[in-house]
Image (cartoon, grey):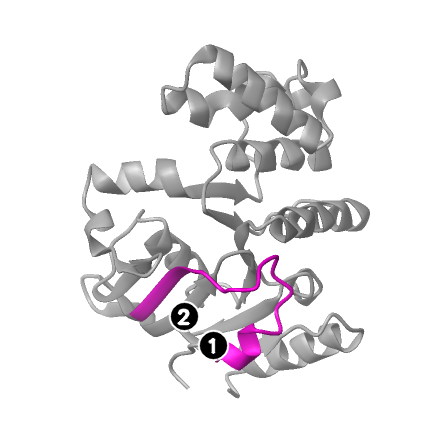
């Protein structure tokens, strides 16, 4: 199986906070070839997928399977060799050319990273404010929005702290606040719990679920089956293609089912 386009009847089971599904992102036949001196690397191979508003989709795969390349295509950091991207039902391949690519990221994508990427010389509230400042939001409105976001995520009391004064979980909450502050339609979370301990991982995942249940669309890249159980569904990557999927049933069987699929795919048996 070289691609995956979820069936409507499957998606209808997803507990999204609306009755009518709104297509946020659709990818059709996307491929990416990196040309090197001696050979070519097919990083993405004929990828098809659709993401709907208010769902969290986990993207699983081993290192080098194409997960990060897909995120780069979705965020217009890199341009596909072939294929089409649709945003809110409209063809949008024009986003791959500057300055549209930069503007697209500022207006539509929030990034959450494993390494947090907070600026060490700025305190919490200034780190969160950065996307608004880059979008020329008036300073009074910036303060109001940042204060509201810090209270919403339970980090208001840390507003004057610098990153080196925070724990890993606190840093990730700040990073999530920064990613959300400009109200982007899509959050891209690349291994957001990879640097956290077990208890903190649970806290951050529960926070992401709360955010998703308010209508936020989240793409969550992970290699951890446990993390993937928090998503509505899972797309499995292998050798540049989506080779399988799993619809979480919010039951104890999810972890075993995801782990079993991941093991088969990692061995190249799907």
Q: Residue at x 58, y 44 (%)?
A: 114
User: SS at mark 2?
Assistant: strand
Work out whether 202 lies above or below 136. below
Q: Along the polypeptide, which appears first: circle 1 or circle 2?
A: 1
User: Closer to the camera, 154 or 53?
Assistant: 53
Q: Residue at x 29, y 61 (%)?
A: 85
The residue singled out by tag 2 in the image is 49
Asked whether the beta carbons under mark 1 and mark 2 sit within 8 Å of each other, the answer is yes
Decide: few, some or many residues near mark 1? Use Cα within 10 Å; few <14, some 14-19, many ≥20: some
Residue 252: image x %, image y %? 80, 74
Residue 176: image x %, image y %? 59, 38
> In the shown orientation, is residue 61 left or right of residue 92?
right
Residue 95: image x %, image y %? 24, 48
> In the shown orientation, is residue 205 left or right of residue 86?
right
Would you say residue 5 sits in the magenta stretch?
no
Q: Quadrant of residue 70?
A: bottom left
Q: Residue at x 67, y 18 (%)?
A: 159
The label on residue 6 is 1
Q: Residue at x 65, y 65 (%)?
A: 15
Would you say residue 15 sits in the magenta stretch?
yes
Decide: few, some or many residues near mark 2? Use Cα within 10 Å; few <14, some 14-19, many ≥20: some
Name the quadrant of the N terminus. Answer: bottom left
> In the shown orientation, is residue 202 left or right of residue 112?
right
Residue 120 visible in this rendered orientation of the protein: no
Range covered by the magenta-colored residues: 6-28
User: Closer to the camera, 146 or 35?
Assistant: 146
Work out whether 57 lies above or below 98. below
3D distance between C-alphas at marks 1 and 2: 7 Å
User: SS at mark 1?
Assistant: loop
Residue 238: image x %, image y %? 46, 75
């Amino acid at each position: 199986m070289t691609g995956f386009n979820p069936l409507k009847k499957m998606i209808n089971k997803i507990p999204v906070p609306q009755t009518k599904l709104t297509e946020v992102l659709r990818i059709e036949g996307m491929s990416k070839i990196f040309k090197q001196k001696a050979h070519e690397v097919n990083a993405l191979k004929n990828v098809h997928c659709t993401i709907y508003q208010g769902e969290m989709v986990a993207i699983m795969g081993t290192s080098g399977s194409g997960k990060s390349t897909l995120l780069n295509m979705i965020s217009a950091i890199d341009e596909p060799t072939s294929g089409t991207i649709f945003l809110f039902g409209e063809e949008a391949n024009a986003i791959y050319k500057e300055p549209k690519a930069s503007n697209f990221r500022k207006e539509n994508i929030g990034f959450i990273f494993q390494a947090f990427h907070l600026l060490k010389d700025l305190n919490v509230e200034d780190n969160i404010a950065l996307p608004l400042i880059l979008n020329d939001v008036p300073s009074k409105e910036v303060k109001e929005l940042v204060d509201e976001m810090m209270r919403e995520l339970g980090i208001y009391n840390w507003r004057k702290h610098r990153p080196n004064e925070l724990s890993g979980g606190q840093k990730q909450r700040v990073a999530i606040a920064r990613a959300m502050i400009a109200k982007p339609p899509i959050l891209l979370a690349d291994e957001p719990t990879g640097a956290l301990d077990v208890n903190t991982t649970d806290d951050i995942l529960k926070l992401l679920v709360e955010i998703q249940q308010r209508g936020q669309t989240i793409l969550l890249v992970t290699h951890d089956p446990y993390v993937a159980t928090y998503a509505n569904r899972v797309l499995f990557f292998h050798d540049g293609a989506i080779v399988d999927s799993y619809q979480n049933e919010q039951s104890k069987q999810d972890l075993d089912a995801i782990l079993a699929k991941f093991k088969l795919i990692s061995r190249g048996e799907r």
